[in-house]
Image (cartoon, helix red, strand yellow):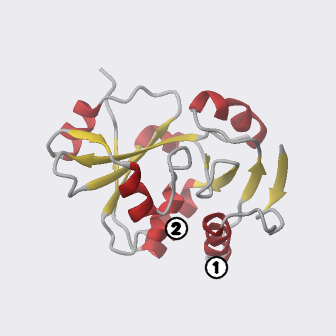
Amino acid sequence: MKRFTGHPPYTPEMTEAERKCYQFLDSLDIAYETLTHASAFTMEECAAVEQQLGAPVCKNLFLCNRQQTQFYLLMLPGDKVFKTKFLSSELGCARLSFASEEHMIELLGIHPGAVSPMGLMNDTQKKVLLVIDSDLLDSEYFGCHPCVNTATLRLRYDDLIEKIIPATRHEHRIIRLQTE
């Protein structure tokens, strides 16, 4: 693992999505750190990243309603149990399920394993509602992928709420997600 203030050096191996993410953050004058690492697909694989980063790595879930007409990006603590019925109730919508990889690519420009609020910069049609579990706000910082799962960003929640979300022109809701 390697840690960088800001982004790592641009290389030919870096994906366009990752490069675009760093350029987006830099254009907003946001201070961030990046930790590069082996692919991390699960929260278990993110445990070592979280330790090195010094910030909790969020669990990010991309969901949709049954008709696949409403899409949600849920951010919650990595160790929090997620049950769709509680989120459906909180949002006042029909049963939720995981959105397809096709919708993830189309709307967020990312692939499974790299879901992140940074993907909102690619949702130019504003079809995705960002939903943040209030338990995350207990920490000043959080970790999320820069649209690839071989790196993790360390960002301030204030920057997410005050700079990143407004720059993407998305709506967001902060909820307290029940687990039982």
How many numbered discs?
2
Q: Residue at x 52, y 67 (%)?
A: 164
**Residue 134 in picture, x, y percent from top left:** 41, 42
Residue 50 picture quarter: top right
Q: Earlier in the sequence, mark 1 or mark 2?
A: 1
Q: Secondary structure at mark 1?
A: helix
Q: Amino acid at mark 2?
A: Ile
Callout 1 touching callout 2 (CB < 8 Å): no
Q: Residue at x 39, y 64 (%)?
A: 107
- Residue toward you, 25 or 37: 37
**Residue 39 in picture, x, y percent from top left:** 69, 42
Q: Which residue is mark 2?
A: 164
* Rendered view: 12 above or below 65: below
Q: Residue at x 46, y 37 (%)?
A: 135
**Residue 44 in picture, x, y percent from top left:** 62, 27
Residue 12 picture quarter: bottom right
Residue furthest top as drawn = 180
Answer with left or right where residue 159 lies relative to residue 161: right
**Residue 122 in picture, x, y percent from top left:** 47, 69
The quarter of the rendered structure image containing the N terminus is top right
Q: Residue at x 64, y 55 (%)?
A: 155
* Rendered view: 125 above or below 148: below
Q: Which residue is mark 1?
A: 27
Q: CA distance from mark 1 to mark 2?
A: 10 Å
Q: Secondary structure at mark 2?
A: helix
Badge 1, how many Cα within 10 Å: few under 14, some, many 20+? few
Badge 2, how many Cα within 10 Å: few under 14, some, many 20+? many
The quarter of the rendered structure image containing the C terminus is top left
Answer with left or right where residue 97 lies relative to residue 78: left
Q: Amino acid at mark 1?
A: Ser
Answer with left or right where residue 134 lies relative to residue 99: right
